[in-house]
Image (tube, rainbow, N blue to C red):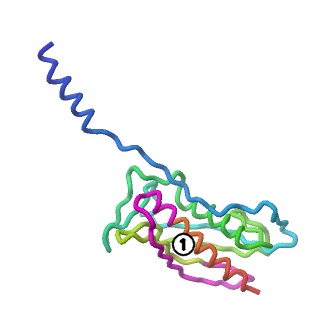
């Protein structure tokens, strides 16, 4: 029995020293939907959000944090609950639906007279100076014309931690949705 004692002690010590950190999963919140304002396609402007793309460093499951002006860390225990590009597309559709009464905004094609929006997100991360960054460009096809706009939103994170960072990222994304909606309402 004495010869097994060191093995048992070593096993117990290694089990205690390798305590696993719990994984936390994040989903972006979106603006609440107004169900009273259900629209029919007959009397509405139509917008198809065709796709939202993200670069490879954002396409993984880990939440991204910028540690210096040139270094990024992809979290191992703070993960997106579903692919980030899908979350960004779904929340953009929900936010635009809320911001554009009289429009039907969908992630599915709506017909021949629809406008089509594509968004390329190049930055969606927290940063070492306590700010969150949401950047990229969007391209709208409207009545045969193409409209392209860059965007860059920076917001200050109010609290430390991934929860606060994800909430501020969602707020910045909603702010960009409001800016897109403002441009859309000025179209002929």
Residue at image position (76%, 74%) is: 114
Q: Residue at left 54%, top 72%?
A: 120
SS under mark 1: strand
- Residue at horizontal 58%, vertical 67%? 52
**Numbered label tally:** 1
Q: Which image quadrant is residue 17 in?
A: top left
Front position in the image: 168 or 65: 168
Let me know if residue 158 is in the magenta part.
yes
Q: Given the current orientation, which residue lies at the most extreme right position?
A: 42
Residue 124, horizontal then vertical, whole percent? 47, 68
The residue wearing badge 1 is: 120
Magenta range: 139-168
Asked whether, in this view, residue 118 is left or right of residue 152, the answer is right
The outermost residue toward the top is 1
Q: Is residue 44 above or below residue 56?
A: below
User: Is 49 inside the magenta-drawn segment?
Assistant: no
Position in image of residue 157 (x %, y %): 44, 68
Question: Is residue 104 toward the left or the right of residue 59 in the image?
Answer: right
Q: Could you tell whether 75 is left or right of 30 in the image?
A: left
Left or right: residue 167 versus residue 70 is right
User: Residue 49's x, y, as percent?
Assistant: 66, 68
Q: Could you classify mark 1 by the number of other residues whose Cα lies within 10 Å: few (under 14), some (14-19), or many (20 or more)?
A: some
Q: Which part of the image, by quadrant, shows the C terminus?
A: bottom right
């Amino acid at each position: 029995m004495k010869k097994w004692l060191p093995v048992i002690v070593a096993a117990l010590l290694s089990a205690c020293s390798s305590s696993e950190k719990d994984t936390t999963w994040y989903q972006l919140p979106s603006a609440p939907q107004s169900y009273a304002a259900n629209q029919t396609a007959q009397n509405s402007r139509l917008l198809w959000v065709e796709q939202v793309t993200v670069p490879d460093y954002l396409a993984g499951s880990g939440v991204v944090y910028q540690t210096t002006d040139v270094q990024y860390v992809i979290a191992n225990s703070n993960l997106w609950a579903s692919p980030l590009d899908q979350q960004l597309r779904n929340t953009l559709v929900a936010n635009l639906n809320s911001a554009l009464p009289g429009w039907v905004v969908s992630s599915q094609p709506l017909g021949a007279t629809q406008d089509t929006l594509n968004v390329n997100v190049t930055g969606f991360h927290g940063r070492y100076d306590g700010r969150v960054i949401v950047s990229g460009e969007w391209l709208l096809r409207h009545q045969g014309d193409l409209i392209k706009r860059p965007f860059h939103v920076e917001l200050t994170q109010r609290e430390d931690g991934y929860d606060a960072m994800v909430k501020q990222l969602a707020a910045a994304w909603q702010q960009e949705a409001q800016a897109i909606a403002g441009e859309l309402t000025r179209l002929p």
